Amino acid sequence: MNLSERRQGIHFYINVSNFDQVVSAEEEETRRVNHAIHALDTYFRSIERFSKANFGDVLTIEKITGARLHLYVVDDVASAYHCVEIVVSYAFLLSKLVNKEIPKYKKLKDFEIQVGACFGHFYEFVFVHKNDNREKDFEELTTIGFAANLAAKLQGLAGVYNICISEDIYDEIVDGTRIYARCENTGLAKYKQKYYYEARLEDLYQLHGVLVDMDEVKEYANEVNLTDMNFPEARKTLTFDSLSKTNGKRIIGVPLFADVRDFTSKFHEDDSNLVEMARKTEDILTKMYDVVKRNGGIHVQFQGDREEVLFHDIGEDSCYEKAVLTGMRLIDVVKGLGVHIGVGTDYGVLYATKIGARGEKDNILIGRTVISADRLEDKAAGCDQIAISEELYHCLVDANSELVDFFEKTSLGVYVATISYKEYLSTVTSRQHRLSTNKGDYNGAWGE
């Protein structure tokens, strides 16, 4: 098991909450997403560079997941939170300046950010996959712990240009407490929490007066021209290793999100079962990764206990049936570990690239199709369910796929199936047997 020693600190997420609107507006107008990708890379790259320059000895940039930057600080709660305040104040001011001060971004919608933070124990888990020759062909860092999960939840609760912090952070900090208001949310019950604290980023920024070196930001933004960013069609199976900000791919395909349901509630608030849950998480991620690889999917990244996967068309070979069947197989394999997942998928145009300050290590999928699949997983799929868009459903209908019989349209206008691969296979096999029997298409006894 590739776990670090047990660590303690604050996890925090900086999320561009309206990035889906930024992408959709540009994609609808230009059928490209160059400006959005370029601006997101400049924004996160600048935050990463500022963070490393000022807190490099205690702060780690974990990864970029979509339009969200995940960072953590290893320190006592007061010192760690001081670091968070400074970095978040910088991110706030930068979000106000990046579109106004850099001409190539002026047509984009302004970035609107939200932040969530929580203190606690965690492990750093390095997921390593070896190929058939037992050589390492894939490695990815992800953190495991209650604090990371609750920080992500608090980020989702934060309003535009607001920060939400956990109660344990609030109880420990001295300066700046007057800017926070106590909030209550019933959705925190599964985290064994009742209250959290929210403040405006404007008020946080006023406490510190952090400055942004826009000359440095502009210098980085101007290193790559928008015209140098190419997104040719993918004509063979995509490999992220060959991608960069300037060399991406335009794809017709299916982004798939598979998320473990109510997994965070199994983490004890006092971290007493952290080792056990770390092992469980490792098992879940490993099993999901193996299923994806065996069935022709492309692993994009882990997002906590969530797996992001890509399937895409190659020539005349469509991927949508394979993607849905893989989703069913994922339900099976995770069930075997005593947990349940929800799966969301859509089919259409999307863009693959790599961005980030750590040698462009973060695999990114961007486009309205990705946004839709993300929402389908989050809003429409329950335990052991696959939620697909109307577009994907009609693709299955046009292909005369037997899968359509397992999906029902919901009040949300999407299609949901509650079925595992074993159940699907059993049903289809029984149906084919009945049809063969009715047609007399079977092998009779010898001599008949």
Image: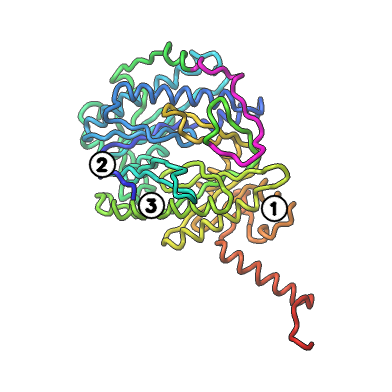
N-terminal-most mark, 2 or 1 = 2
Residue at image mark 3: 281
In the visual, does 198 lie left or right of 225? left
Please provide percent x and percent y for residue 159.
42, 33
Q: Is residue 96 visible?
A: yes
Q: Of circles 2 and 1, which is in front? A: 2
Indicate which disc residue 396 carries: 1
Looking at the rendered structure, the kind of residue marked 3 is Thr
Whether residue 238 is in magenta: the answer is yes
Instruction: From the viewer's side, name the closer residue of 283 and 448.
Output: 448
x, y percentage for residue 337? 42, 61
Give the structural element (helix, strand or loop) at label 2.
strand
| Left or right of residue 244, residue 175 in this image | left
Q: Which residue is mark 2?
A: 7
Residue 33 in the magenta stretch? The answer is no
Q: Is residue 164 visible?
A: no
Identity of the amino acid at label 1?
Leu
Q: Residue furthest top?
A: 215
Magenta stretch prevailing secondary structure: loop
